[in-house]
Image: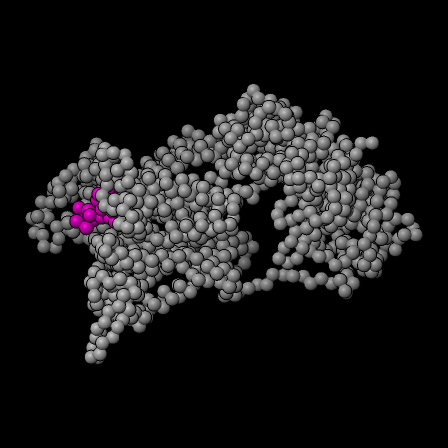
Amino acid sequence: MWQYIAKRTGHAIFVMWMVATTVFVGLRSVPGGPVRAMLGQEATPQAVARLQADLGLDQPLHVQYVDWLGGMLTGDFGRSITSSEAVGTLIASAAPKTISIAAFGVVLGLAVAIPAGIIGATRRNEPADYTATIGAFVGISMPAFFIGILLAIVFGVHLGWFPVVGYTELSEGVVPWLKSIVLPGIAVGLPYAAGVTRMMRSSLIETLDEQYMRTAVAKGVSSRVQLYKHALQNAMIPVVTIAGIQLALVLGGSVTVEIVFGIQGLGRLLVNSILERNYPVTQMTILLVAGIFVFMNLLVDIAYTAIDPRIRYGGEQS
Amino acid sequence: MVPPVLEVEDLHTQFPTDRGTVKAVDGVDFSIEPGEIVGLVGESGSGKSVLAESVLGIVEEPGEITGGDIRFGGESLLEMTESERQSIRGGRVSMVFQDPMNSLNPTLTVGEQIAETVRLHQDTGESVSLSAEMKRKIVGAAKNGEAWRRAIEMLETVEIPEPEARAADYPHQFSGGMRQRAMIAMALACEPDLVVADEPTTALDVTIQAQILEELEDLKDEFDTAILLITHDLAVVAETCDRVNVMYAGEIVERATTEELFENPEHPYTQGLIASTPQLDDPDESLEPIEGNVPDLIDIPYACHFAPRCPEAERECFERQPDFRPVGDGDHEAACLRRGPEEDQL
Amino acid sequence: MSDGAPDFARNEGEFGSGEVPPEYETEETVEEYKTTTQRIVAVLKRDKLALAGAVIVVAFVLTALFAPYVAPHGPEEQFGFMQEPMSQSTGDFDGDGSMETVTHYLGTDDFGYDVLTRIVYGAQISLLVAFATVAFAFTAGTTLGVLAGFYGGWIDTVVMRGVDFIWAFPTIILGVGVIAVMGGLGWMNVVVAIGIAFVDDFARIIRGEVLSIREEEYITAAKAVGMGDGRIMFKEMLPNAVSPLIVQATLMVPFAILGEASLSFLGLGVKPTTPTWGLLIAGGRGFISQAWWISVMPGLAIMAVVLAFNTLGDGLRDAFDLSEGEVN
């Protein structure tokens, strides 16, 4: 098992390095050069040259690369073009907001999706199943930001239960904090839950059809014990896979949802930095998001060791 | 007079499908006495697996038993409630399945899977409620509990080395032969009166097959269990069974003791089956395959199910249901209009 | 009888092996081979959801193609501001001197434009971008898939791993990043930005087909048969690939629509002059307390079209008998 974890961690680090390199190359390949794009067409050659020197973009490519990588490892993430703040600071204030919303969405999503999927599988074609299926369908057919808007209209504007704009820091109290992340959390969590529900349902249906379930019946095991003791863990294995893949939806969704709810999270930061051609910020934000993504997938890989004994313990011993 | 362990009387099991009703078991009678090994021979499509499932009461929906009776130790299984049947299943009647690879749950330890049966059917004082089972799943079974110890005992009985350590292993850590032994251990753990073994050796290597069969026989003696051995492999039958029933297309066509059946097969199907099996002591004899295919079990319109493929078929064979006639020695019967005492033959 | 092989067929019957009296002849039922069209029709008849999906998809395509004729008004025709759905305006709108009353089924927005009209015109762009995206993904995916399958080895590994990662990565963020690199707005950038994320699905399907003909080639090489078989294999490969490709494309269109809507909503998509659905939603965001319909109506349109393509795609997958693993 430890071998497996080490392998997956090494893989994750490799992927991050590839992403960083791609980001590095990508942002330096902007048509006309990043500096020209930042300053606009009318910029004087001197202004361009000065900014280039400032950003170290006049150095040979490999030197830039080493500097840049080295900088990241030591915590120097560059400065924002527009505000001269350290990028690290900007990100540090934006990240917790995005992470709170994403985490809330995932937890809520799983808490709803797994029971819904189980019900769907055990009460096939009954009203409960139809409700869950329809809910899942709806969840994946609307962009997250639209779900956010609908929620904002119903629960924010009309019912007034939750704030429609802004994020309240945890330091100002747990309940206000929670209230500010509920609506955006549901908006990113619903499409996520939809995917997980479908997989839970179909995986459980398949599992119940397996040979070893017939053995359990032949032993006289009660149906509830069959479901929870014999079937569920096996059915969860593909669900863990999907739960990991769908995390991408949560991250992607939070970008647009943050705009809807006026939250100054990573999504806002990313979009604004692109509109402003603020490349130092753009590249670090993308890198961070990629990092979160890779890390979450690593967690999923590790979760397998808990769920699938075939991964936890090696192969045959005769 | 001790009643037979199992008595199947005119059993009918059917599956409704889009194209019609599949009559998988179409009027089957047989019985098993305590301590016997009875073979049930048939090709795929003969209905033998469905018959096994019917005896256990685990026929999959939409199939159902539509007629006849199954009596276990004199009591009718069909008249019991489901929970009564559930308490018999795994305890007094148990089943060994064909594919040991997929018949064991990959997420439960082997020991736990055996211990579970013990807890369900014997008085171990350990709870089988849902919460107790879930706790057991997460934390593991109580290692000093009676059920767990019994599981280790059973693993030892089926000659699995280091049983205490192995009980805590998962099925994927066992080899094929060991898995099948574990399945047998699971089936015998509660000392059942009857074990139904559905192709127990088909998925195994030939060398392991022999071992497993030998063990089945030894265990039968040790536990005084009757075995219903279902297989398509004549060699297996010849090796282990006391008596044999031959099944074709949902019906039993011949019954006899093993020796008598192989020495003196009477039903044309049995004869064909044996003729199409390579004989070790006569390797140059040419094989005579039976022409044609196993029939579709949906609404067979003619009487004797084997008639279309039978070289001896007469018109009446298609019209009159063949009844069992005494043939050969001992309790040897064949369901064929062209067999039996002279005056009854076609 | 104990000499080994027992006798078989002791007597000669009237009907030998395989012979049956005529009245007992059973017909063998063989499953009919249905052509592709027949199967699609059969599924549409059976699966009501897929049928509904097909209807909506057709309506969507027609609306997009004939927008100027379908739309009740012009996209920049102004009426009263922020009027509610089902409200009416009276005025001389067609310049003929007489007053007409028109109904704004979905209301008007903050510029006074009729929302229904804007949505109809928005369908044009959404359709264009979605199809272009799928076409781009298909082209790029096929090229990469053929390369990976044909060359194999490390090229295969590198290409497929890279494509896999891109597919798994959040689409919107990837899209945003690509837009950043491409340096501007416009529908072509959107096509590339979203299309990149979907290259993987097509690449896999094509690569699978290439790999299987490679294997067949080795087998035929062993039999030393000539060119004729190559053409046969080509004829057999393509039909195999066509059905998963069609299903994949159908299922991809809704994702492309969602992706474009998201990018446009962020202001990073199509140029703001053309009213795509994403932009319409963005435009109404500031008014959700007073005029919720400005954002909600286009959103419902997106939902309907996405659902329609999804149910149709699922139905097609059924018709072609593909498992869920083969087509994502």
Task: Report the front residue among B193 and C249.
Answer: B193
Instruction: Indicate the position of residue A245 as horizontal and vertical percent values.
Output: 38, 44
Can you say whether A175 is above or below B63 in the image? above
Residue C87 in which image quadrant: bottom left
Q: Quick check: C54 above or below B1?
A: below
Residue C129 or B58: which is nearer the viewer?
Answer: B58
Q: Residue at x 40, y 47 (%)?
A: A194
Q: Residue at x 87, y 45 (%)?
A: B326
Can the viewer see residue C91? yes
Q: Quadrant of the N terminus of chain B?
A: top right
Q: Which residues are magenta?
A: A258-278
Colour theme: one colour
Asked if residue A238 is positioned above or below residue C45 in the image, the reply reads above
> What residue lies at 41% left-to-right and 47% top-to-bottom?
A195
Q: Please, which residue is most extreme toward the right here?
A: B343
Task: Give the percent coordinates (x, y) of residue C195.
Answer: 33, 55
Residue C52 % position (x, y): 44, 62
Q: Is residue A270 magenta?
A: yes
Which of the 4 quarters of the picture holds residue B305?
A: bottom right
Residue C126 as seen in the image, left or right of residue A53 = right
Residue shown at the point (82%, 49%) measured from the top left: B335
Quarter of the picture holding the C terminus of chain B:
bottom right
**Residue positioned most to the front:** A159
Q: In screen coordinates, is B316 left or right of A72? A: right
| Residue at the top extreme, as displayed | B144
Q: Nearer the viewer, residue C204 or C259?
A: C259
In this rendering, position of residue C275 left or right of residue C36: left
Examine the residues drawn in magenta and state their main secondary structure. Answer: helix
Considering depth in this image, is B308 or C205 the residue closer to the camera?
B308
- Residue C145 in view here: no
